[in-house]
Each structure stands twice: as C-alpha cells, then as structure tokens.
Image (spheres, rainbow, N blue to C red):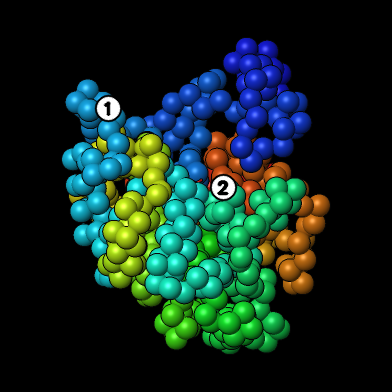
Amino acid sequence: MVKQLSNSLAHTDVSKTLHPYTDARAHERQGPLIIDRGKGIYVYDDAGKEYIEGLAGLWSVAVGFDEPRLVAVASAQMAKLPYYHTFSHKAQEPSIRLAEKIVGMTPAPLSRVFFTSSGSEANDTMIKMVWYMNNALGRPKKKKFLARNRAYHGVTVASGSLTGLPNNHTDFDLPIIPVTHLTCPHFYRFAHTGETETEFAARLVAEAEAVILQEGPETVAAFIGEPLMAAGGVMPPPAGYWQGIAALCRKYDILLVADEVICGFGRLGAAFGCEHYDFTPDIMIVSKQLTSSYMPLAAVIFSQKVYDAIADNTAKIGTFGHGFTASGHPVATAVALENLEIIEERDLVGNAARMGRILQTRLGELSEHPLVGEVRGAGLIAGIELVSDKKTRRPFGAAGKLGAMAFVAAQNHGLIVRAIGDTIALCPPLIINEDQVHELVARLSDALDDAA
Ligand code: PLP
C-alpha cells in the first residue's frame, strides 16, 4: 500500500520527523495516516474517512475523543494558573485534589502519590524510590528487579530495562539495571503439553522462587508486572499466578509493583487489574486512562511504609533529590480529576464489564476462523493471535507479517487496531456501547477474511 505523498503535510512529516515505534524507511515510502479529529469512539483522517479507534489511541482514551468537560476544565485551569510546580514545599490545588481522589480509589495500603508525565518516568521514579528506600533502610544490596519476558514498562533507560521485549533492548544496549526476566505467563504459548493452568502458574511461581534463592533474597528488591500483560500481546495470567507471586514477595520481603498503566481505571471491568485478579501490590503505577490521555500524566502510588522510609531519609539528607518540572502539572491534574469523575458518574467501569462480556463472547466466535489460533482477554481488552496451523499453533513467522496485513485490512474497513507480531490487539474506549461492539467485531471479521 504505497500512498501518494502529494499532500504537503504528509510530505513534511516524512521529511522532517522520526516517528516512535515506526519503520522509518517504510514510513518514507508509505507516509502517515493523519488523524484530524475525533468523536466518541471514532476518529477521522484528513480525507474524512471514519475509523473505530479499536485501541483507544494507545490503550488510553477512556471517555472518547470529544469529551467537552475535559476541554472546559483544561481551558479554565489554563486561564487561572497554567503552570506551577510542586518542588520545595510548593503546591497547587488540582494536584492535591487528584492525589486525594486517587488514594480514595486505590486499594489499601496505597496511600501516597508522586506525579510524573509518562508511564516510563513513573517506572523510573519507582526504581529510584525502591533503591533509595533500601539504602535508607541499611540494606544496600537489595536492588535487583524481577520482571517477565514480553512485559512492557516503558522505554527510558531504566524502565526500558524492565521491559522484556527484544526490540526495546536490541542495539539500545539494554537492560542496564539488575533485572531478571522470568517466563512470560502466557498459557497458550508457554505451558508444557498436558499442563493445566494451575500447574503452569505453580511452575512459574517455583521458577521465580528459584531465581530469588539463587540471587539471594537479600539482593532482590521488587517484582514488577502488569496485572494483564498488554503491549507485549494481551496475555491474561493463568489462574492462581498472582496469588503465588504475592505470597513469594511477602515471604522474601520483596516489594510487589503492579504496573497498571493500561489495566488501571476500569480496563478489565474492575477499577484496577490487581482487584480483578485479587492481589494487593505495595506500589502501583498508573497513567493513560488517568487523563484519558488528553494530557500527559502518570503517577506512582505507594504505601505509608515506603513513604516513611523515604521521608526519614530526606530528613537526614535535607531533600528528596528527584522530581520533574511537570510533576503534578495543574492542567494535567485538573483534567485527570474531571476524567475520573466522569468515569465514576457514568459507571464506565461497569460499562467495561458489561460491554467486555459481549466483546469477549463475540470475539470468541472468531476462534472458528481458519487464521485464528487463540482469542484471549478480559473486560475491554483482547488479543486475537493468528497462526498458520491451528492444530500445531505454528506461528506465521516472518516477524508478524500476517498481523501487519490484518492491520492494514482493518484500516481499510475503518477499524484501527494494533498488530503485535501476529496478535491483533483491541482495547476500545470504555464508553463503547453494544451496537458499536458488534460493529467493531464485524469490521474485524471482514479484515480477517481479507487477510486470509
Ligand atoms: N507501563 C505499561 C504497562 C505500559 O503499557 C506503558 C505504555 O504503553 C508504559 C508503562 C510506558 O508509558 P509511557 O509510554 O507513557 O512512557
């Protein structure tokens, strides 16, 4: 699909920019899809073509693409106080109110909030907080992280090290922090023949324990995981996995970090992924649906125990030497507060549960399709893995070529999805209604027929 780059905006794009997560040379040939405006779950390109935004932007626009209340709040805050920082005892009302709101929504024992602008920055902040805390507690050797293969935790030098995807490491010389990537908890791909889900979960927990014992529990600081692994291919954990991991963390005094950047604020049909899977983290990372991505904002949420260790140390040193110019930005936090109010008032978490059940059932029907190996997900997030042989689960190879074809076919049918190798990821806005779920599945089904 080579597009004529007669459009001067497209020409400027290919001649002046480097796009994130894009094959730059392919982009020079085919040019951008320029999205011009949004309405509800739909976006429109510069030629006026309509698309269902089947990935809610980047897994993030909960309230849809034209929510006037967020525009009004942003504009009012811009007019009143467009910027103020939170360094050196300074504060402004929106970030205080948002911290209070977030603490009220998150499960105990989470009770403190530190703001950043992106999920990657939040994970970097978390890593530094954990290290700082363990130094303060007089256990300087307790610094290592446990993460999983195919995990996604960001792209900065430290958070990118926690990420467990080859294209985030290769030629970037990552990882550079001490991290062990454990087996990806994806049953369909990594369970042994004949293993049940529970046996698979128990094997992965035993693997984690063996690594902890081999490294020395006194050197392992934290385990980080997305409750449901999203950007690596939409992989829900096997039953019992999180309970086993949480018990291990308690046993060896290891902090459990739930990276809820995608799962948080309703995606799985529960307020948080850790609630859906019934485990309690010591630290939680949120972003994306926090503001519906209308403004960049993320947060590290942590327990009083973590706070006290850090706070006592700052009293000794005189300051906590970490923070960003935009930490707690007043426009971003004002927008987040309004966005969370809307999510509550419109019961979008309940809607995600209800529409999620319909979406998962309808997608389940696609399991019969000759290309589809597995349909998986929870709430309003799903992955459809394409295979060249349903029986042997043989992948298509050639690094996601079929996934890429299905992605283009979906776009032709007015549906934006994400191709992760040969897995098609879906993650529509939380406001989606039943008719729109059926429309989304119909467009996807047509795209799969085209790709077959
Ligand atoms: N953590 C998770 C679970 C994510 O999915 C992402 C982004 O997709 C990040 C962290 C990084 O967030 P950002 O892209 O805002 O740096």
Q: Mark 2 points at which residue?
A: 156
- For the residues bearing labels 2 and 1, Cβ distance under 8 angstroms: no
Q: Can residue 338 be seen in this view?
A: no
Percent x, y of residue 424:
61, 52
Q: Which of 417 and 291 is in front in this view?
A: 291
Q: Is mark 2 within 8 Å of ligand 1?
A: yes
Percent x, y of residue 104:
21, 60
Percent x, y of residue 35:
51, 27
Query: Would you say 213 lies left or right of 133 here?
Result: right
Query: Would you say 214 lies left or right of 98 here?
Result: right
Q: Which of pointers 2 and 1 lies earlier in the amino acid sequence?
A: 1
Residue at horizontal 27 percent and vertical 33 percent from the top: 84
Question: How far apart are the alpha carbons under marks 2 and 1?
Answer: 27 Å
The answer to whether residue 197 is above or below residue 96 is below
Q: Name the residue under label 1.
A: 82
The answer to whether residue 214 is above or below residue 175 is below
Q: Can residue 387 be seen in this view?
A: yes
Residue at horizontal 25 percent and vertical 51 percent from the top: 99
Q: Residues within 10 Å of mark 2 (few under 14, many from 20)?
A: some
Q: Which amino acid does label 2 sit on?
A: Thr
Q: Nearer the viewer, residue 186 or 368?
A: 186
Q: Which structural element holds mark 2?
A: loop
Q: Residues within 10 Å of mark 1 (few under 14, many from 20)?
A: some
Residue 69 sits in quarter: top left
Residue at horizontal 67 percent and vertical 64 percent from the top: 373
Q: What residue type is labelled 1?
A: Pro
Percent x, y of residue 275:
35, 69
Q: Which of 168 and 12 is in front in this view?
A: 168
